[in-house]
Structures are given as structure tokens and as C-alpha cells.
Amino acid sequence: MKGKVKKFGAVFFLLVPLLVLPTVHATQIVSGSGPFSTTVTSAVTSLVDGIAIVHETFTLSLTGFLVGTTLGTALVVIDLSTGSGVFHGMQTFTGTANGVAGSFQMSFSAEINGFTAFKGQFTILTGNGGLSNLHGQGTIAGIVNVSGTYSGTFIFT
């Protein structure tokens, strides 16, 4: 009996460290895309030496992988002689991602060509609710302040 207790004790002490290891969560990587439409709710424009500088507040309505709305702000800078420019900003999404409800903050930036067409990228920063462990990044393209599409890689951890 003494030998069995000794073996049990040795096995027990080998297994104890496994009890304090962090639990591994499954990671799901999903590609997703869809269209969006834009509504500008306010804009303040300044002109400086042929450059338009616009501070705007907007909403987006998204469908596809992301279903919901955003509220955001952007800084838009356009050279009025060429139609080239850039914009960047932040927005808060509320809705579902792949059917999971919650919200998240994301940053975005893009280049503008010919006054209206844009191409850029977005990054998901922080989430809440069912999207608290969502991360992701991708591309955006479309017509400035009208509509566009998004496509990205979304990681649920």
C-alpha cells in the first residue's frame, strides 16, 4: 500500500502545475465583407491655399458580415486643384458581426482620387458585449460620403 501512495503522490505533484495554467480559448478567424452607405450629419469646411479641410460627423449603415450602424468623425483634406486627398477618423459600430451582437471602436484612413473615389483600410480597436474579444482589419473602397464596400479578416478570441 505504501508504494501505491508514493506513486499517487508523485503523479499528483506532476499534475498540480497543469491546474494553474491559463485556459486556452478557441480562436475563430473569419473573412467577411459587405456594402455600406454614408450619411453626413455635420461638416465644417475651411479653405487654405486651394486645400479643403473638412471636419465631419457621419453615420454608416452596414450589411453583410457586419449588420448595424456606426457613428463617427473624420478629417478630410482635399487638394482642390487635383482632387487628390486623404481622410482618417474613428467610429463606433453597434450591431452584429457574423451574428454576434455588441459594439466596437475602429479607426480608418483612405486616399481620395478624383474628388470622390476612395480606397483605404480599417482596424478594429476595442469591443464591448459579445464583440469584446473581436479584432480585425481590412480594406474599404467607394465614393466619398455616399457609399462603399468593406472586406476584412475578423478574429474572435
Image: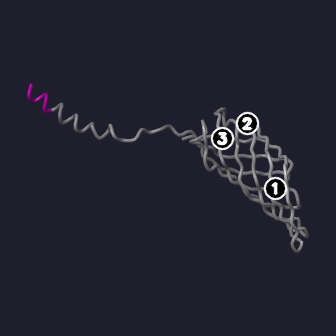
Toward the bottom, the furthest residue is 49
> What residue is rendered at 62% in x and 50% in y?
125
In magenta stretch: residue 25: no
**In terms of sequence position, does the residue under pointer 2 or pointer 3 come before the other?**
2
Residue 27 picture location, percent across and down:
53, 40
Q: Residue furthest top?
A: 1
Q: CA distance from mark 2 to mark 1?
A: 23 Å
- Judged by depth in the image, the label closer to the viewer, 2 or 3, is 3
Callout 3 amino acid: Ser
Q: Nearer the viewer, mark 2 or mark 1?
A: 1
Disc 2 marks which residue? 67
Q: Earlier in the sequence, mark 3 or mark 1?
A: 1
Asked if the residue at tag 1 contacts the one at tag 2, i.e. Cβ–Cβ closer than 8 Å, the answer is: no
The answer to whether 84 is drawn above or below residue 23 in the figure is below
Nearer the observer, 7 or 74? 74
In this figure, which residue is indicated by the disc labeled 3? Answer: 103
Quadrant in the rendering for residue 35 = top right
Using residue 137 as the reference point, say whether residue 69 is left or right of it: right
| Picture colour scheme | one colour
Question: Circle 3 — which element?
Answer: strand
Q: Position of residue 117 (x, y in %)?
A: 85, 56
Using residue 12 as the reference point, say whether residue 35 is left or right of it: right
Farthest residue in the left direction? 2
Counting other residues with Cα less than 10 Å from the Cα at mark 3, is it few (<14), some (14-19), or many (20 or more)? many
**First in residue order: circle 2 vs circle 1:** 1
**Measured along the vertical axis of the image, is residue 73 above or below residue 129?**
below
Which portion, as a residue range, is magenta? 1-6
Residue 109 x, y percent position in the rendering: 73, 58
The picture places residue 145, in percent across and down from the top left corner, at 85, 51
Label at residue 56: 1
Q: Amino acid at mark 2?
A: Val
